[in-house]
Image: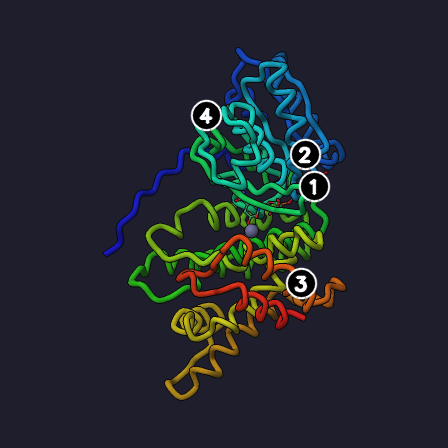
Amino acid sequence: MLNFEYHNPVKIVFGRGTIAELDKLVPTDTPVLMLYGGGSIKKNGVYDQVVAALGKRSVLEFSGIEPNPLYETCLKAVETVRREKIGFLLSVGGGSVLDAAKFIAAAALYDGVDTWDILAKGAEVKAAVPLGAVLTLPATGSEMNANSVISRSSTGEKLYFSSPLVYPRFSILDPETTFTLPERQTVNGIIDAYVHVFEQYMTFYLNAPLQDRQAEAILLTLIEEAPKVLKNPLDCDARANVMWTATNALNGLIGCGVPQDWATHMIGHELTAFYGIDHAQSLAVVLPRLLTHCREAKKMKLLQYGKRIFGIEFKKETECKAVDAAINATEEFFNSLGMKTHLSDYKIDANEAAGKISRRLKERGTMLGEQEQLSPDDVAKILIGCA
Ligand code: NZQ
Ligand code: ZN
């Protein structure tokens, strides 16, 4: 019998022209810090819309938050928050800006000695500056979850934390803001969302048919909508469908009460930390080989997935082939979007990556997978397979 709690406090404001709603959502009685990235919002008019909606509020800006946001950059913003007595953070951008906002919110009010402990030691977050988001890149689900992933350039680490105190108070999702996404980022977002579903769905069989069907609905929607946004980046309906789908892939609902894996993400974070490849690029490389490595443990779900998503029929004696076909169809879907799926595509030496990453996981004593069945040596084998 399933047993879980589900609580999601984020107010979602979805649709064309919704940035103007900021006027109703952002407090007027406290200084606001607007956070953004490298400037895409200035080119596509989002910045102007936000500034217009904030009107006469007292607003400071902090820009230059990089993709895979850096701890070092966040610390500069923390200084600003403390010095200027900021009472609200507004993230305007993709998952990186929002993850940075979440960390800054927690770090600014952290009462311990070293804010890195929030990420490295799971130090308790007891307070956080309230925050809201205008999302411009559907991918991470950060707009409706309590997670944040931060990288540290001095040590080459990429770590996450999660706290209910950093849920955005609201997230504005205007699909029109995504019209200007470069194709690479559109594809990254679709694959990130696809793999988020996998981490919560592709485990072992449990009698949770609703979560399974909801997860499959997300996968099917991504497969249907992806070619539309790639063919016509200004297709607002398809952009909207991708946006809402990505949010639902990681807002906690499909993961309620079911086993979760997250090994692809943990290995992917190490690839990004060591080699700088995009988050979704790392996932697309690791996932197919991880599925092959774990094909026995995940067999029932791989067969169900193959049949329901790609129509791969099977009998007892053809199960092995059907599992292969399901894994191949996944990789082919990634490739059909122009996404590469091998380490050699990024000029990364698989043996070197396997050595570095498995060593690091050994040092941390990390076991991965839905049953903690993957040792650092298994991870090394998976990475060698990613060549
Ligand atoms: O910095 P700007 O100039 O804004 O440009 C960004 C950035 O270069 C650009 N961009 C964003 N919206 C745009 C746009 N360009 C044109 N038009 C727009 N509308 O896209 C580039 C990538 O942005 P980024 O925010 O880095 O991408 P994404 O949303 O994919 O976020 C990736 C980060 O999220 C983490 C990843 O590890 C990575 O650090 N994740 C966060 C999760 C979470 N909080 O739950 C879960 C995920 O698994 C993931 O780990
Ligand atoms: Zn992800």
Residue at mark 2: C-beta within 8 A of ligand 1:
no
Q: Are marks 1 and 2 in contact (CB under 8 Å)?
A: yes
| Disc 4, SS | loop
Q: Are marks 4 and 1 in contact (CB under 8 Å)?
A: no
Image position, residue 113 (x, y; %): 54, 27
Q: Quadrant of the C terminus?
A: bottom right
Give the residue drawn at x 62%, y 57%.
228
> Is residue 130 in view?
no
Quarter-of-image position of residue 107:
top right
Image position, residue 254 (x, y; %): 40, 52
Q: CA distance from mark 4 to mark 3?
A: 38 Å
Q: Which residue is mark 3?
A: 353
Q: Are marks 4 and 2 in contact (CB under 8 Å)?
A: no
Give the residue type that dot 4 points to.
Ala
Which badge, 1 or 2, is on the more N-terminal residue? 2
Does 365 sit above or below residue 82? Answer: below
* Residue 301 left/right relative to 324: left
Which badge, 4 or 3, is on the more N-terminal residue? 4
Give the residue drawn at x 47%, y 71%.
294
Residue situated in front as seen by the camera: 267 or 116? 116
Q: Which mark is residue 154?
A: 1
Q: Which mark is residue 127?
A: 4
| Disc 1, SS | loop
Give the residue type that dot 1 points to.
Ser
How many residues crowd mark 1 within 10 Å: few (<14), some (14–19), many (20+)? few
Q: Which mark is residue 72?
A: 2
Which badge, 4 or 2, is on the more N-terminal residue? 2
| Disc 3, SS | helix
